[in-house]
Amino acid sequence: MSDAVHLPSDEELAAALNELRVIVEANALLKSAKLSDSFLKRVLWAKHCKIQNSEKLLLAYADWHLKHLGAADARLSITAVHAFLLTGVLQEPPGARDLNNRLAVYMQPDMYKPGKIPA
């Protein structure tokens, strides 16, 4: 038994990405998830560019996401986040970081006034 790992070439990955993108666009659940090409590439890498296995993983991800986090349409866009920062609903305390050294943002629900959020 070999421990060799198959690393796809750039061309192989691009072809698999195009094929997977067609599958995503044809599936209402996956299409509504608004999956980026970088995310799809990570899925392809995880499943060794096997399209059928990648599709199964994406469907399981989309199903889990819908059950636990809600529809993709409910996510905040960067524009909405910016508006929330401007109005004080979201705040980024100086130097606040999580355990993975990512910026931490805090929400103040009492500051949320939908009529005052710039469009």
Image (tube, rainbow, N blue to C red):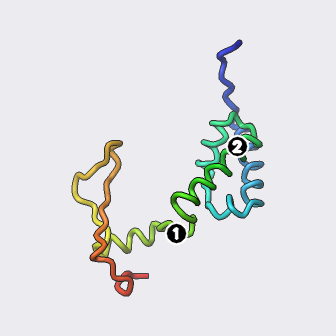
Sooner in the amino-acid sequence: mark 2 or mark 1: 2
SS for dot 2:
helix
Kindly give the residue lying farthest to the top in the view shown.
1
Residue at image coords 40%, 68%: 81
Is the Cβ of the residue at disc 2 closer than 8 Å to that at disc 1? Answer: no
Whole-percent x, y for residue 92 in the image = 28, 61
Is the residue 34 above or below the residue 11 in the image? below
Does residue 6 appear to the left or right of 100 in the view shown? right
Q: Nearer the viewer, residue 51 or 68?
A: 68
The residue positioned farthest toward the left in the image shown:
94
Q: Which mark is residue 52?
A: none
Residue wearing tag 1: 74
Which amino acid type is marked by label 1? Ala
Depth check: give the residue in front, 110 or 93.
110
Residue 62 in the image: state x and y as whole percent: 62, 55
User: What's the amino acid at mark 2?
Assistant: Ser
Q: Is residue 53 above or below residue 111?
A: above
| Residue at mark 2 | 54
* Relative image position of residue 106 (x, y in whole percent): 30, 62
Q: Quadrant of the C terminus?
A: bottom left
Which residue is rendered at x = 74% and y = 49% of the image? Answer: 20
Numbered marks: total: 2
How dense is the environment of label 2, judged by Cα within 10 Å: few (below 14), some, or many (20 and up)? Answer: many
SS category of the residue bearing label 1: helix
Residue at (32, 59) in percent of width and height: 105
Which residue reaches farthest bottom?
115
Identify the residue at image location x=70%, y=43%.
Answer: 54
